[in-house]
Amino acid sequence: MKRRTFLQGTLAASAAGLAVSAGLLTPRMVMAEGGAFDAKTLDDALKAMAVAPTDSADIKIKAPEIAENGAVVPVTVTSGVAGTTEISILVDGNPTPLAAMFILGEGTQPEASTRIKMGKTANVIAIAKAGDKAYTAKQEVKVTIGGCGG
Amino acid sequence: MSSIKLKAAAKGDVVEVKALMTHPMETGQRKDKKTGELVPAHFIQDIIVTAGDKTILTAKWGGSVSKNPYLAFNYAGKAGDKVKLAWTDNKGEKDSAEADVA
């Protein structure tokens, strides 16, 4: 737990500090463990991540157009933006939109694949961070059976 | 017993890392069908992948990553590298696995 706090602290300190002083974030959101992951709406998740991404054709999402099973939706995100250091995957229709964040080491290619859950038909949103800028793209995935139901 | 299947294969100077972990990845929002009670959240939160002493990928996950999660990425490396993946979940449980790059 300490390590997580430390990592988040170092990664988010500068950006979050600015956001707090600008009144974008309440201190509670910053302090909360995994604040961005707890965010209930896409806007809140973006605020907690302290990003204001611009649309970019350089961000590619590989995901099925139709997912028969929302519990397992394969997603690959590739960033064509030079200097990409971080790739995040969000789903705007999920109760907590932020699904995964990948922080790339030196020499790691700006591409990440995983499988995510989608509760209903929604957009898969990819965000790539490069320097102090963020870029985004989205793709709609139609879900025939939701992955978050009981 | 390790709950992680880790494979790393070199193609030229790029290494493809693939991992499959065994984990329930409960969101904390799903209800048990029999009792009607919420199943407590239980998901992998942090993953660190290293090659030798270099961190090649750090992942932070929420509950919306699928059960028995899959992860794949590429890094600049070579055959013979030692790749290690370690995860920690929201209950503080940990596991790790190592693989030699083939």
Image (tube, helix red, strand yellow):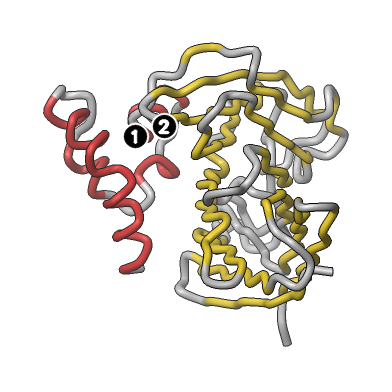
On the image, the x and y values in percent for residue B86 come to: 58, 71
Residue position marked by numbered label 2 in the rendering: A45
Q: Which residue is drawn at 87% across and 34% down?
A: A68
Residue B30 shows up from this direction: yes
Q: Which amino acid does label 2 sit on?
A: Ala
Residue A123, quarter of picture: top right
Residue B28 shows up from this direction: no
Tell me the element at label 1: helix
Q: Which residue is drawn at 69% across and 58% down?
A: B77
Name the one closer to the observer, A85 or A23: A85
Name the one closer to the observer, A52 or B28: A52
Residue A72, quarter of picture: top right
On the image, the x and y values in percent for residue B75 come to: 67, 51
Mark 1 nearby-residue class (10 Å; few <14, some 14–19, many ≥20): many
- Using the image, determine if residue B48 lies above or below residue A119: below
- Using the image, determine if residue B81 lies above or below residue B77: below
Q: What residue type is labelled 1?
A: Ala
Tell me the element at label 2: helix
Name the one closer to the observer, A79 or B1: A79
User: Label 2 vs label 1: CA separation?
Assistant: 5 Å
Residues at discs 2 and 1 both on one chain:
yes
Residue position marked by numbered label 1 in the rendering: A48
Q: Mark 1 lies on which chain?
A: A
Mark 2 nearby-residue class (10 Å; few <14, some 14–19, many ≥20): many
Marker disc for residue B87 = none
Name the one closer to the observer, A4 or B89: A4
On the image, the x and y values in percent for residue A113 come to: 72, 44
Q: Mark 2 lies on which chain?
A: A
